[in-house]
Image (spheres, helix red, strand yellow):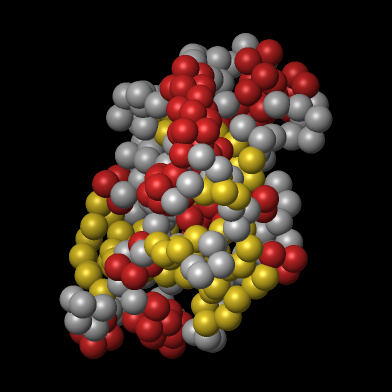
Amino acid sequence: MKYNFDFLNIFTNEDIEINLDEPMNKHTSFKIGGKADVYCEVKTKKALAELICLCKKNEIPYFIIGKGSNLLISDNGIRGIVIRLGGEFSEMSLTENGLISCGSGAALASVCSYALKNSLSGLEFAWGIPGTVGGAAYMNAGAYGGEMKDIVEAVSYIDENGIIKSFKRDELNFSYRRSVFTDKEYIVTDVLFKLENKSQSEIREKMDELMGKRKSKQPLEYPSAGSTFKRPEGYFAAALIEECGLKGASVGGAEVSEKHSGFIINKNNATCEDVKNLIAYVKKEVYKQKGVELHCEVKFIGT
């Protein structure tokens, strides 16, 4: 379907930076994906709320992405508008009562560094997770014994009517890789972190330790979307995949990593279809051999 995007002309470059027919392989950690009709970097909350309302009014689909670290985008691209949050969404500050307030478009790595600089501990587990704060809060990201639910104090968001609201910690309904946002059309705009005071040397030591583990165990040298599957209750996805003899299995340019079988990597110019077919094959084999159903952690977007 062909959409009319003339309504975007009301925005200035100070509000939104607009690119047409943008190759999405430039904007995902998988390095896979066709062109988006429109790719926008939105710089203010006011512009975001207005853009969302106009998209709905004109019946144009829109998709919010962060760093593209948990996405698989169709080889045929995306019809509609892709929205990346920049500008004020990347800002960070320390509140009077010692909380870190940051925009949802801020990179997790930047927030971890900011916490270290201010001698605040609790985000060390996120050091090395290649995503944004908004995406992390949205899916309750976690690693090495830590999760967003442990440190998020509040989250501000734009609701389906373009109104800015907020949830406190006990309203966020965090669970494994889920939150109150998972099944809603809300857009995360800001996240408030409550961390603990600790010496910079202790924080740095923990960050270095966890980064060392990532580098030794994960195939960071290849494009991927991180862990491909959610952890099945009572099992580890990577262990099940390895026990089924699937380590190194491939379809086209996509491969189950030899280094960590929980990762599907783009080893040799993989297409979206390569990855989807390999995911389907792994799920089928694990269910056939182990009777365990794997659920994909990676989000698919496109036609």
Whether residue 236 sits left or right of residue 192 in the image: it is right
Task: Name which residue lies at 48% across and 55% down.
Answer: 133
Question: In this orientation, which residue lies closer to the viewer: 218 or 285?
Answer: 218
Q: Is residue 55 visible from the viewing direction of this image?
A: no
Find residue 252 and report its horizontal and vertical position in percent: 39, 25
Find residue 73 and report its horizontal and vertical position in percent: 41, 48
Task: Name which residue lies at 26% across and 74% down.
Answer: 16
Find residue 116 and report its horizontal and vertical position in percent: 44, 44
Residue 25's quadrant in the figure?
A: top left
Task: Name which residue lies at 80% across and 26% down.
Answer: 291
In the picture shown, does residue 224 fall above or below 243?
below
Find residue 176 and report its horizontal and vertical position in percent: 71, 47
Q: Tell me the quadrant of the picture where the N terminus can be found.
A: bottom left
Question: In this orientation, which residue lies closer to the viewer: 112 or 6?
Answer: 112
Q: Is residue 155 visible from the viewing direction of this image?
A: yes
Q: Tell me the quadrant of the picture where the C terminus can be found.
A: bottom left
Question: In this orientation, which residue lies closer to the viewer: 143 or 253?
Answer: 143
In the picture shown, does residue 265 fall above or below 103?
above
Question: In this orientation, which residue lies closer to the viewer: 300 or 216?
Answer: 216
In the picture shown, does residue 142 fall above or below 159?
above
Q: Residue furthest left?
A: 13
In the picture shown, does residue 266 fall above or below 146?
above
How many numbered markers are drawn? 0
Residue 97's quadrant in the figure?
A: bottom right
Task: Name which residue lies at 28% across and 54% down.
Answer: 35
